[in-house]
Image (tube, rainbow, N blue to C red):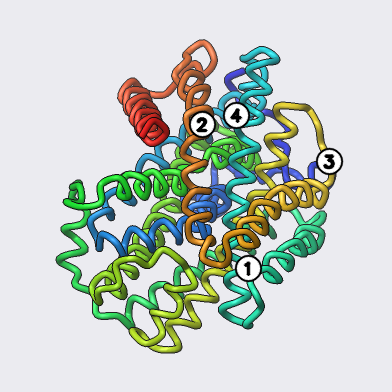
Amino acid sequence: MFSLPTTATAPFCPAEVNGSIRIDARASFSQRLRRFAGPGLLVAVGYMDPGNWATDIEAGSRFGYQLLWVVMLSGIAAMLLQMLAAGLGLVTGMDLAQASAARYGRAGRLLHWLSAEVSIVACDVAEVLGCALAFKLLFGVPLLWGVALTAFDTLIVLGLKGRGFRQLEAIVLGLIATITLCFLAQLALLDTHWPAVAAGLAPSLPAHDMDKAVVLALGIVGATIMPHNLYLHSSVVQTRRVEGGDGALRQTLLLCRIDTIASLLLAMLVNGAILVLAGSAFHAAGHTAVADIADAHELIRPLAGSLAALLFGVALLAAGQSATLTGTVAGQVIMDGFLKIRIPCYQRRLITRALALLPAAGGIGWWGESAVGPLLVWSQVVLSLQLPLAMWPLLRMTGDRALMGAHAALRWVVVCGWGLFWLILAANCALLLG
């Protein structure tokens, strides 16, 4: 129960797994860390998806840098929860879906499965809209046609068939690097008041439009701490294990924490950069109602030049495609863990994308292209509503010494986790009742 499984199984196309990555405990620390790095990146891309863009852009345009502290605290909370999820997988040899299925009865298992599936579909709605917008901004493709084109990303999943996790992680790393470099270049083209940015890291509430600020703050939380990422991380981390010598599991957990913190710190900086970009380009120029990514693209051209607009579109496309890949892996983990059903990856991708295409195309067809911004923000609010159902079993199990043994979460970590749980639940209730 309290040692690493002897055969870690990667969830990506389970029938075609190339095996886990074994790390020699006698190797130097830098060599061990280099061999371990990767699972955190697969999780981090979910924190840079188009849903994050929508909430951060609207928050930056409406309130300047005032909600930057929400991005920072959400990023720190995500690190804590993702480390708990990864620790559960490494210590027990079960991912969060498998552990939840074993702990709860049939009704509880189905409830958690449905909640996790809703979060994946909500996230995929954001990827559909983001990629469709990127096609429009870069190539002039009409938005509804762009939505239809996103159905073909199944071909990408098919192209990865049998490639193994290292190849998938390399592709994701390339996409993350693209997103990061694009935003760094855009910020360099803008005149940003950095003392004001630093002031935005101090918690404060806007003096106006409080209801909208709460919705956007919840959207940022939902876009940052994604429920399906907890299931994903607890599974993919099992593709790594340190072997040989004393304290192999403890070494593995240490490497996992470093990988998680470094990856999510990068994601947090990217999300902060999006909000700062919106605050510098739009709020400072008096454009305080930019709630649409397409509007942001058009406004950034006269403010920062054509190069910034091009980089904006490229980063958006990279964000949508990277999150699509990891969403497929998460879907496999959840279906296998809760229902004991394994299907080919392309079938899983088709199911998720078909369910996401309906609200995306329906919303645009009914309300027009102006619906994209609100659809993106509310897709992230849906994620926030689903988050407590993923956090509940995670916090209960990782704090359980009977399950986790000596590697149970420290008391202060458990207290912080439950405090975050009740805070998110209260904010969700306030939103629903308000």
Amino acid bearing label 4:
Leu
Kind of element beneath mark 3: loop
Amino acid bearing label 1:
Ala
Kind of element beneath mark 2: helix
Residue beneath disc 1: 132
| Circle nearer the N terminus (1, 3) | 1
Q: Could you tell me how far apart the alpha carbons at marks 2 and 1 are, in whole angstroms?
A: 37 Å
Q: Could you tell me how far apart the alpha carbons at marks 1 and 4 are, in whole angstroms?
A: 32 Å
Residue beneath disc 4: 96
Give the residue at x 57% y 55%: 126
Q: Could you tell me how far apart the alpha carbons at marks 1 and 3 are, in whole angstroms?
A: 27 Å
Q: Position of residue 39 (x, y in %)?
A: 57, 48
Give the residue at x 68% y 65%: 147
> Quick check: 275 above or below 233?
below
Q: Nearer the viewer, mark 1 or mark 4?
A: 1
Residue beneath disc 2: 87
- Camera-side residue of 342 and 219: 219
> Quick check: 236 above or below 274?
above
Residue beneath disc 3: 343
Amino acid bearing label 2:
Gly
- Camera-side residue of 25 and 213: 213
| Circle nearer the N terminus (2, 1) | 2
